Image (tube, rainbow, N blue to C red):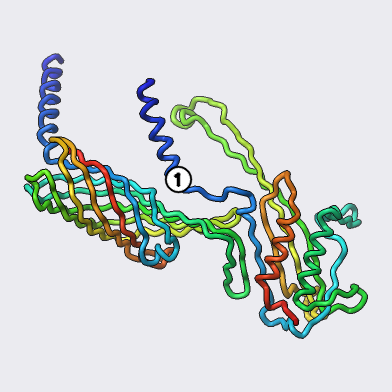
Amino acid sequence: MPSAMKKIIILTLLGICACTMLMAQNNFAVSYAIAQPTGDLNSFIGKTSFRGISFDYRYTVKDNIAIGFSASMNTFYESKPKDTYTVDNISLTGKQYRYSNNIPLLVTGTYFLSPEEPMKPFVTLGLGTMYSRRNTDMNLYTVELEAWNFALQPEIGVQYELSDMTALHLSLKYMQGFQAGNELKSAQSFFSLNIGFAFY
Amino acid sequence: MKTKLATVLPIMVLLGACYPKGPDYVEDADVVATSYDVKYDFKAKSTFAMPDKIVVDVSIDRGDTTYEYMLPAFATPILGAIQSDMEKYGWQRVDIDEDPDVVLTPAGISSTTYFYSYWYDWWYYGWGWYYPPYYTVSSYTTGTLIMVLSDPSQAANSPIRRSPAVWTAAGNGLLTGYYDVSRATDAIHQAFAQSPYLKTN
C-alpha cells in the first residue's frame, strides 16, 4: 500500500507540473457582452441588450492558431406600450413584454496576428448551435417559441497582455443563427461587443 | 465561511439584476379582447336594448335560478360607459319590449386560481428517508367583464333557438383588494375603440 501511495503522489505531482506547462497554451476569456439585435430579432426587440456574458476557451495548437469553444448568453428584453394586435376578426389590446434568450454554443478556430507582441489582434470563426427562446407575455399568459439554430459566428478582437497570466480582452462578434424548426420561423442574428479579461 | 459568503453574495445579486423585469402594476396585465361575426351587417341596425343590472353570479337551487348582481356603485358607471359608447357609434337604446335590433348583455365574472407547490428534500428520493414535504399555497383572482351583442331575429336560424353572438368583448385583469371602476370603464372604451365596425353612423 505505501508504495502504491507513493506512486499516486508522484503521478499527481507530475500531473500538476504537466498542467502548469499546459497552462501557457490555455487562453480563457470571460467577458461582459452588450448586444444589438439585427434582422428578425431586431423587428421583435429593437433595444440593445446589456445582459450578456461570454466564456471563450482557446487552446493554442501552433504559435498563432488556437482551437476552442465558446459559450455565451445574450438576453434581450423590451416592454411594448399598450397596443392593439389584430388577427382576422379578433383584436387584443394590452401591454406586451418581449423576451429573447439566446445561448450560442460553438466550436471555434482562432488566428492570432501577433502572438509574441503584448497586443494580440485575432480573428475567430465559431461554428455550432444556438438555443433561442422567444417569449411574448400578455396578461397572465406567454407565447413561447424555441429553436436550436445552426450558428455561424465571425469575430474580430484583441487581447492586450497585462501580465504573464492576464490580458484585457475586447472583441466584436456577429452571431448568425440560421432558421431552424417550425416555431421560430426566421434566422436570429445580433452583434455583440465583448469586454473582459483573458487568463493564460 | 465568511469569505465564501462575501464572494457568493455579490455574484447572486449581480445575476439577479441580470434578469429582465416584467409588469410592475396589476394594470399592466389588463387586456381587452374583441371578436365579431364578419358576415353580420352592423350598419343596417340601429337600436339596442340592455339590462339595468350586471349579473356577477348565478345560483340554481332546486330548479330556481337566482341571479346575483353587481353593486350599483360599480354597475352604474359601467352601464353608463357602455350606453354612451354605443350612442357615440350611432345606436339608439330602446326598451327590450320595443323590438330592438340587437341586445347587449354585460356580465362580470371573477375567478380565483389556487395553486400549490411542494418540495421534498432530495434525500427522500435518494435514500428513502422520510422527510415531510413543504407545501406553499398561493392564489390570484382575475376579473373579467364580458359584453355580448346578439341579434334576437337570428334565434330562429339557430338549432338551439338562441341567437348567436355577433360581437363579444372581454376585458380581463387581475383583481386586488382595491377596486377602481375606471379600469372597467377604460376596458369598455377600449373594446369599442378597437371595434370600429360597430359604427352605424
| Position of B42 relative to A179 (above/below) | below
- Give the farthest residue toward the top: A2
Residue at 75% of width from left, 76% of height from top?
Answer: B89
Between residue B165 and residue B17, name the one nearer to us.
B17
- Horizontal side of residue B191 vs A107, given as left or right: right
The location of residue B98, given as percent across then percent down, is 91, 78
Can residue B68 be seen here? The reply is no
SS type, badge 1? loop
Can residue B90 be seen here? The reply is yes
- Give the farthest residue toward the bottom: B44
Count of marks, rendered view? 1
The location of residue A182, given as percent across then percent down, is 42, 66
- Horizontal side of residue A60 vs B169, given as left or right: left
| Position of B47 relative to B7 (above/below) | below
The subunit letter for the residue under badge 1 reads: B
Question: Where, quadrant-wise, is the C terminus of chain A in this rendering?
Answer: top left
Question: Badge 1: how crowded within 10 Å, few (<14), some, or many (20+)?
Answer: few
Question: Where, quadrant-wise, is the N terminus of chain A in this rendering?
Answer: top left
The location of residue B120, given as percent across then percent down, is 52, 32
The location of residue A111, given as percent across then percent down, is 13, 53
Amino acid found under the numbered disc labelled 1: Tyr
Could you say which quadrant of the image residue A32 lies in? top left
Residue at 67% of width from left, 73% of height from top?
Answer: B195
Residue corresponding to mark 1: B19
Residue at 32% of width from left, 61% of height from top?
Answer: A177
- Horizontal side of residue A106 vs B88, given as left or right: left
Could you say which quadrant of the image residue B159 lies in? bottom right
